Image (spheres, helix red, strand yellow):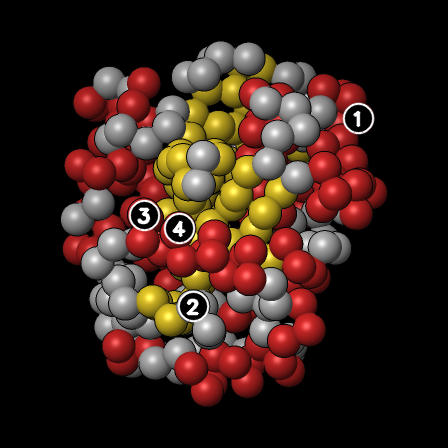
Amino acid sequence: MSDRAEAVPTPMASLAGAGATDQAPLEYSVIGLQSLSGAEFDSLFDEMGKVMTAAVAVGDAGGWSLESWESRRDRYRSVDHTYLARCEGELVGFTVVEMAVVDGRRCAHMVAGYIRPEFQGRGIGASFCSRLIWRMLLRKPWSRFYICADIINPIVLAGWRQKCARKRALYPSIEPKYATSHMNRIAGLIAADRYPACPFDVATGVMGNTGPPRDTPTAVSGDVSLDQHYRSHVKPEAAESVLLVIEVDARSLAASAFDLTRSIWRISPRAAHVGRSKMTNS
């Protein structure tokens, strides 16, 4: 597959949820923003800005505005991987990923991700993450690597907690019985490397100054322990969020083999065929 772009259409009917959009196909793709011409990049960045403003208009805005998004334009021109989801040609979701090396291992830093409200809760975010893991495995099979992000919304972190079968490979553990000195050390290294200007508390995973201050209340995930963690430690007015770190290796993949296999199938040529679509590369 091309490093510039790759796309696999996936049937919307395979995603959870209901509504008119269920009848339209989704197309997933990954593209290196650094491979685009100036005009191509600007056009895509503007599309991403529209998705961001639609997403934050109905949820926890995280202090973000179109002006805040615009401030990242130059930074994103050199990004390696951006995962996109389109419906009938319209961009409906994306995740921007910067690659780094932390403690001698690859680290995929998800620096931004938004999904239009009418498409949320239908597996798009999970598909992005599965695709990211799959690409990293293809590049270096059975290697250990990290995925990290700063999480404003506890609903997002709750999703990771549900999917991660090996609880000791996820930071923050929330429950003390799953905490390990190894993951605490890795989280500290990632915070220093990826968020050098942000105060970080390794005991709680809370980082400050990760974006604009927020005056909106934090969402509720339904995960009692996690929601209590956010209420007790995260201050929106101080632009605080929680650092998520996941260690992916053979043990964690084996523990989550069924979910990973199902997600890989959804982005495979066979899944595209079942959806009466055709794999395309551009």
Left or right: 257, with 69 as reference point: right
Residue at point 79%, 47% (across, down): 255
Foreground label between 4 and 1: 4
Residue at point 62%, 81% (across, down): 225
In front here: 178 or 269? 178
Disc ID at residue 190: 4
Secondary structure beneath dot 2 equals loop
Q: Earlier in the sequence, mark 2 or mark 4?
A: 4
Q: Earlier in the sequence, mark 3 or mark 1?
A: 3
In front here: 252 or 75? 252
Secondary structure beneath dot 1 equals helix
- Alpha-carbon distance for marks 3 and 1? 43 Å
Contact between labelled residues 3 and 4, with CB atoms less than 8 Å apart: yes
Where is 203 relative to 120, above or below? below
Q: Please provide percent x and percent y for residue 108.
A: 46, 39
Contact between labelled residues 2 and 1, with CB atoms less than 8 Å apart: no
Q: Earlier in the sequence, mark 4 or mark 1?
A: 4
Task: Find disc 1 in the rendering and name its residue.
Answer: 274
Foreground label between 3 and 1: 3
Residue at point 52%, 28% (across, down): 29
Q: Quadrant of the N terminus?
A: top right
Task: Find disc 2 in the rendering and name its residue.
Answer: 202
- Alpha-carbon distance for marks 2 and 4? 11 Å
Amino acid type at circle 2 is Val
Left or right: 144, with 69 as reference point: right
Where is 27 relative to 53, above or below? above
Amino acid type at circle 4 is Ile
